[in-house]
Amino acid sequence: MTWVLAAILWFGLLTLRTPGRWAVTGFELALFTLAGVIIVQRRGTLRIDPVALLLAASAAWPLLQIAAGTSVDTHRTLESALQWTTYCTAFSIGLVLTADRARRRQFLTAQLIFALLLSIGAVVGLFSVSALGPFVYRNQFAAYVESLIGVAIAAAIRDRRSALAWLLVSAALFASVIAAGSRAGSILCLAELILLPLVAFTRGWISSRSLARVALLSAAAAAALVAVVGWETIWRRFEEPNPYSLRAELTRSTVNMIRDRPLFGFGLGTWSAAYPAYARFDDGTFVNQAHNDWAQWAAEGGLPFFVMMLAMAGLLVRPAIRSLWGLGLLAVFVHAFVDYPFQQRPALAAFFFALAGVLRNTACNEPAATSSPGARSPAAPFPASGPSESSPPVD
């Protein structure tokens, strides 16, 4: 069943650029069918998780907006209800199927390898046909990489014998984001390369010697691969004057929308329909998203919906720190302050929530971390192949 989930998620990612509704519908039907099979096999036994409850409430919220007559576009809000149901389903399946530690390792290993292949294909496509593989938008591609680059770094910290190989994987993922030209993505991926080993060191999971080794190898590999793919695109983008001025204007408009309807919002999925009345300028182009998922959630769903999203992200913090690799998923939520990784592409958002389900198992199934002598390494998805250092349980 775990491989079925992986295949469904990969189908969704590979068809992100596909025009028409059939790909999204097929992806949603596949997830719902898998959920039904799991429920039948388990004879209706459900595992309750706070994040799943919040996602279920998120799926019900747009229906409440429609019933209350607060949505400015009922069709879009109804579509959002289906999308959030899909996200809740993806999370729940990920939670159930990866409760076993070995399955979590296999699932994350497979996702990491697939991400490496996708990133290589994206770079090749970028230089050959000016397209990032199946990804339409550079920042959504960067968010996808952010969610998984931590898996490679955690593996390098855990597995001494294969550390160089995993660091090369993380460097390749980082280089692909540089080639894509995502400013926020480049900063966040670089932050992961630097901060994750530091977190492992401060928690006593690795020694200063190991920290120096990982840092040196990571820096060398990243520099070499960035030189291969080129850094000119990202450099030009950083040289742009006031690169986030447009996003700032959109956020100000969105804040005004929130002030007008703080309780129920304008209806999930309706930001682009409500925005023109609050636009601070008009250059003749259509603005599809607020470029700030957090502000858009508050404008569309009201402050109660924003609080639900904030609570959900908060519930991922502890398992993210315990697992180490999960900090990459938190990076996606940070990226959402300046872009829209959770909007527009339901299959990509569903992937993030499925990964959140995997991450929640770190909090639900593992004993408390310890930094005492003889403990095992961070909750990484890979078994040790070399001498172990003082660190918390393996995930």
Image: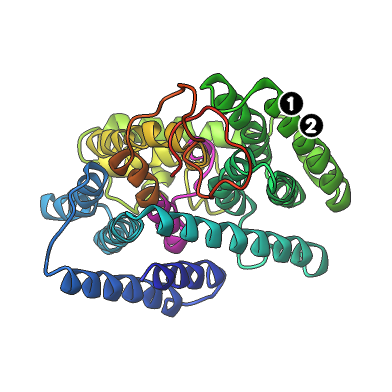
Instruction: Count neighbours of disc 2 (C-alpha within 10 A) and say few if under 14, some if 14 to 19, many if 20 or more.
Output: few
Residue visible at 59% across and 32% down in the picture: 196
As helix, strand or loop, the secondary structure at mark 2 comes to helix
Residue 43 horizontal side relative to residue 181, left or right:
left
Residue visible at 32% across and 76% down in the picture: 29
Residue 353 horizontal side relative to residue 338, left or right:
left
Q: Amino acid at mark 2?
A: Leu
| Res. 86 image quadrant | bottom left
In the rendered image, the vertical position of residue 315 relative to residue 92, given as above or below:
above
Q: Bounds of the magenta span?
A: 334-355
Residue 262 horizontal side relative to residue 390, left or right:
left
Which residue is denoted by mark 2 in the rendering?
Answer: 216
The numbered dot on residue 212 is 1
Instruction: Name the quadrant of the N terminus.
Output: bottom left
Q: Position of residue 36 (x, y in %)?
A: 22, 73
Q: Nearer the viewer, residue 218 or 9?
A: 218
Q: Nearer the viewer, residue 304 or 384?
A: 384
